[in-house]
Structure formats: C-alpha cells, structure tokens
Image: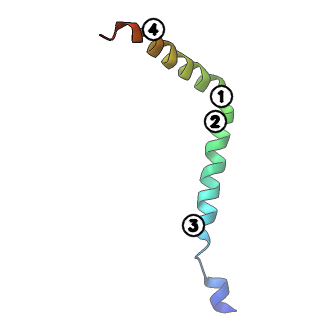
C-alpha cells in the first residue's frame, strides 16, 4: 500500500491534461483575435499568389 501511495507514474498524464486545459482556455479567450490573424494571413496569401512568376 505504501508503494502505491508513493507511485508517481501517473503524474505525467495529469500534467499533460492540465496543459491541454490551459491551451483550450486561451484559445477560447482569444478566439476573435486568432480568427483575425488567420484571416489576415490567408488574405495576404491569396493576394500574393498572382505575383508569383
């Protein structure tokens, strides 16, 4: 039982889940800013495609 309580092999999974939750939260908070940046990038790409020779 003591070995079970001191086993830390599952700590990596908890840390990964917390990181994913934080990233999802940031995406939700900055959703409109991210959409604006992505749209501007795609507008620039599509406007510059005619200039490629």
Residue 5 placement (x, y as % from top left): 67, 84
Please state if 48 lies on the left or on the right of 2 as rendered. left
Query: Do the residues bearing badges 3 and 4 touch, measured as CB atoms within 8 Å?
Result: no
Residue 17 placement (x, y as % from top left): 64, 57
Of callouts 1 and 4, the N-terminal one: 1
Q: CA distance from mark 1 to mark 3?
A: 28 Å
Write the residue at 60% across / 69% down. 11
Q: Residues within 10 Å of mark 1 (few under 14, many from 20)?
A: few
Query: Do the residues bearing badges 2 and 1 touch, measured as CB atoms within 8 Å?
Result: yes
Query: Do the residues bearing badges 1 and 3 touch, measured as CB atoms within 8 Å?
Result: no
Q: Residues within 10 Å of mark 3 (few under 14, many from 20)?
A: few
Q: CA distance from mark 4 to mark 2?
A: 27 Å
**Quarter that holds the N terminus:** bottom right
For disc 2, the marked residue is: 27
Q: CA distance from mark 2 to mark 1?
A: 5 Å
Residue 31 falls in image quadrant: top right
For disc 3, the marked residue is: 12
């Amino acid at each position: 039982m003591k070995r079970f309580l001191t086993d830390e092999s599952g700590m990596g999974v908890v840390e990964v889940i917390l990181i994913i939750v934080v990233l999802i939260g940031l995406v939700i908070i900055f959703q409109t800013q991210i959409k604006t940046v992505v749209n501007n990038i795609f507008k620039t790409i599509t406007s510059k495609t005619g200039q490629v020779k």
